[in-house]
C-alpha cells in the first residue's frame, strides 16, 4: 500500500508537490528494495541444499535438536516440533532416510507438520549411520567397526534409546509411534527382543510393514543371488557405508534428474524399478531433491534385507556366516529368529497393492502373527508404491488423515 505510488498520491489528496515527493521517494527505490526482499524466492537448488533444521525453519516452524547416546555408544539426533505438554509422537524413517525425508515439501504435504498442527508433540527419529547419527563415543565413521550394524541394532538400541529419551523428557509414560518401512522392522525387532518396551508404545502405526520379504522383482533377486560376492567386493575395497555422500556426484546425479533434462525419465524409471511405478503421484520437479536428501546407512543393513529376501518366510537376525561371530553376538551359533507374537503393542498396518517391498502376502502373515493388531488397511489406490507414503501427491487423503485420526483416537 505504502509502495503503490498512485494510491499513495490519491490518498494524500493528489497534491502535486506531495506526489513529486512520493515519486522521488520511489527514485531512491526504497520500496523496490523492500518488496524485492520479501518476494525473493528461494530457488529449488537452494532448497535442495538445506538440511533438516533449515528446511523446517524455511517452512515457518521451529525445531529443536536433541542428542543422546545409545547403550552401545552411538550419538543420535532426535528432531522435535515442540508442543510442550502435548502427547508425544515419534516418527521413524526407513532405510536411507533421515528427518529430511519427512520435511522437504512443506506443511501442506508432509506428515510431521500435519501432526504438529493436529496438536501433537512431534519427535522425528534418526538411526545410527545416517546424516544425523555419525558420531560414536569411541569410534569414528572411518572405523569399519562403526558400520557393523543393521536394523537389528537399530531395533535393539536406537529405538529403545529414543523412547527412553522422549519419555524422560516429556514425562509421558508412553509414546505414539509411526514408522515407515525399516521403521516398522525396527519396531518388530524391539518388540520381540526387548518386550518390556511394548508398554512404552501407546499405538504402533506401520506404513509399509517389512518383516518377511517374498520379492519377485528381477533386480532384487539378482542382487540377492550374488549378495555374498557384492558384500565381499565392498569390504575388500574398504567400503562399509552404503551411499557415502560424495557431494559432487550427488549434484551431477540431481542435475540429470532435473526438469528439462533428457535423462529425467530414465532416472525416474530406475527409481521406480526399486519401489514400484506410480507416475501419477510423483512430483518430478522434486526428484533431485529426494535424491540429494538420501541418507547413508551401512552395507550390513542392505545385506540384512538381502538375507530376508534370500530366505523368504524367515525373519531372523543377521547371519555373520561365522559360528564364532554369531556366538559372540547372539550367544548361539545360529542367529535368533524374531518372534512376532511377542510384539504386543497395539498395531495398525497400512499396506498397498503396488508396493514391491511390502507385499500383501507378507503383510497378511505379519498381521496373523502379531497378537494385537487393531487395524489393517489396504490403501485405496491401485498404483500406490513404497515411497508414496512419503511423497505421494495424494498421501494426505489416502494415509495421513487416517493416521492423524488414529493418533487422536489413542490420545
Ligand atoms: C568406550 O571405550 C571405553 C574405554 O575403552 C570403554 O570403557 C567403554 O565401554 C566404551 N564405550 C562403548 C559404548 O563402547
Ligand atoms: C511439485 O514441486 C514443486 C517444487 O517444490 C512445487 O512448486 C509444486 O507445487 C509441486 N506440485 C504439486 C502438484 O504438488
Ligand atoms: C514365541 O513367543 C510366544 C509368546 O512368548 C511363545 O509362546 C512361543 O513359543 C514363541 N515361539 C517360538 C518359536 O519361540
Image (cartoon, rainbow, N blue to C red):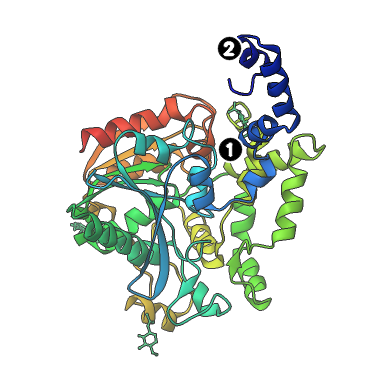
In the image, residue 72 lies at what x, y percent?
36, 75
Q: Quadrant of residue 104?
A: top right
Marks 1 and 2 close (CB-CB < 8 Å): no
Q: Is residue 243 above or below residue 149?
A: above
From the viewer's side, name the closer residue of 319 and 8.
8
Q: Residues within 10 Å of mark 1 (few under 14, many from 20)?
A: many
Q: Is residue 194 visible?
A: yes
Mark 1 sits near ligand 2, with its Cβ under 8 Å away: no
**Percent from the top left, x then y, of residue 279?**
63, 29
Between residues 109 and 374, which one lies in front from this camera angle? 109
Residue farthest to the front?
Answer: 17
**In this figure, which residue is indicated by the disc labeled 2?**
11
Residue 256: quarter of image: top right
Helix, strand or loop status at disc 1: loop
Q: Which one is nearer the viewer's eye here, 38 or 364?
A: 38
Question: Is disc 2 surrounded by few (<14), some (14 to 19) or many (20+) residues within 10 Å?
Answer: few
Q: Which residue is mark 1?
A: 276
Residue 386 in view of the camera: no
Q: Image quadrant for the N terminus?
A: top right
Residue under the point 35% across and 70% down = 70
Q: Identify the residue at image location x=53%, y=58%.
A: 306
Secondary structure category for the residue under label 2:
helix
Could you tell me which residue is drawn at 53 percent across and 50 percent down?
Answer: 54
Q: Is residue 345 left or right of residue 237?
A: left
Amino acid at each position: 500500500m505504502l509502495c503503490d505510488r498512485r494510491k499513495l498520491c490519491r490518498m494524500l489528496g493528489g497534491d502535486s508537490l506531495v506526489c513529486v515527493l512520493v515519486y522521488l521517494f520511489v527514485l531512491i527505490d526504497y520500496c523496490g528494495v523492500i518488496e524485492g526482499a520479501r518476494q525473493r524466492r528461494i530457488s529449488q537448488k537452494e532448497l535442495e541444499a538445506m538440511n533438516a533444521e533449515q528446511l523446517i525453519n524455511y517452512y515457518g516452524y521451529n525445531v529443536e535438536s536433541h542428542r543422546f547416546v545409545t547403550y552401545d555408544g552411538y550419538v543420535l539426533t532426535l528432531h522435535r516440533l515442540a508442543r510442550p505438554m502435548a502427547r508425544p509422537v515419534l516418527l521413524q524413517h526407513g532405510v536411507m532416510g533421515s528427518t529430511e525425508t519427512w520435511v522437504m515439501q512443506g506443511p501442506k504435504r508432509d506428515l510431521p507438520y500435519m501432526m504438529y498442527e493436529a496438536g501433537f508433540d512431534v519427535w522425528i527419529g534418526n538411526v545410527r549411520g545416517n546424516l544425523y547419527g555419525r558420531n560414536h563415543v569411541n569410534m569414528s565413521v572411518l572405523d569399519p567397526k562403526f558400520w557393523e550394524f543393521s536394523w537389528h541394532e537399530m531395533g535393539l538400541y536406537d529405538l529403545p534409546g529414543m523412547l527412553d529419551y522422549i519419555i524422560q523428557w516429556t514425562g509421558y509414560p508412553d509414546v505414539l509411534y509411526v514408522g515407515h518401512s525399516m521403521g516398522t522392522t525396527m519396531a518388530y525387532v524391539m518388540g520381540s527382543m526387548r518386550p518390556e518396551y511394548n508398554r512404552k508404545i501407546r499405538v504402533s502405526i506401520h506404513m509399509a510393514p517389512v518383516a518377511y520379504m517374498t520379492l519377485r522383482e528381477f533386480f532384487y533377486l539378482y542382487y540377492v543371488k550374488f549378495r555374498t560376492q557384492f558384500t565381499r567386493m565392498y569390504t575388500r575395497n574398504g567400503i562399509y557405508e552404503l551411499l557415502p555422500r560424495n557431494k559432487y556426484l550427488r549434484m551431477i546425479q540431481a542435475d540429470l534428474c532435473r526438469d528439462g533434462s533428457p535423462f529425467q525419465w530414465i532416472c525416474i524409471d530406475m527409481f521406480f524399478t526399486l519401489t514400484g511405478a506410480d507416475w501419477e503421484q510423483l512430483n518430478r520437479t522434486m526428484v533431485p531433491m529426494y535424491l540429494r536428501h538420501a541418507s547413508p546407512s551401512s552395507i550390513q543393513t542392505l545385506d540384512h534385507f538381502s538375507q530376508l529376501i534370500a530366505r523368504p518366510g524367515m525373519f531372523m537376525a543377521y547371519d555373520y556366516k561365522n559360528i564364532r561371530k554369531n556366538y559372540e553376538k547372539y550367544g548361539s551359533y545360529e542367529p535368533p529368529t524374531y518372534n512376532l507374537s511377542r510384539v504386543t503393542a497395539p498395531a495398525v498396518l497400512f499396506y498397498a497393492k503396488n508396493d514391491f517391498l511390502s507385499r500383501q502376502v507378507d503383510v497378511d502373515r505379519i498381521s496373523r502373527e502379531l497378537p494385537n493388531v487393531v487395524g489393517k488397511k489396504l490403501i485405496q489406490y491401485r498404483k500406490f508404491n513404497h515411497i508414496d507414503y512419503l511423497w505421494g501427491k495424494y498421501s494426505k487423503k489416502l494415509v495421513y488423515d487416517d493416521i492423524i485420526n488414529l493418533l487422536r483416537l489413542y490420545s
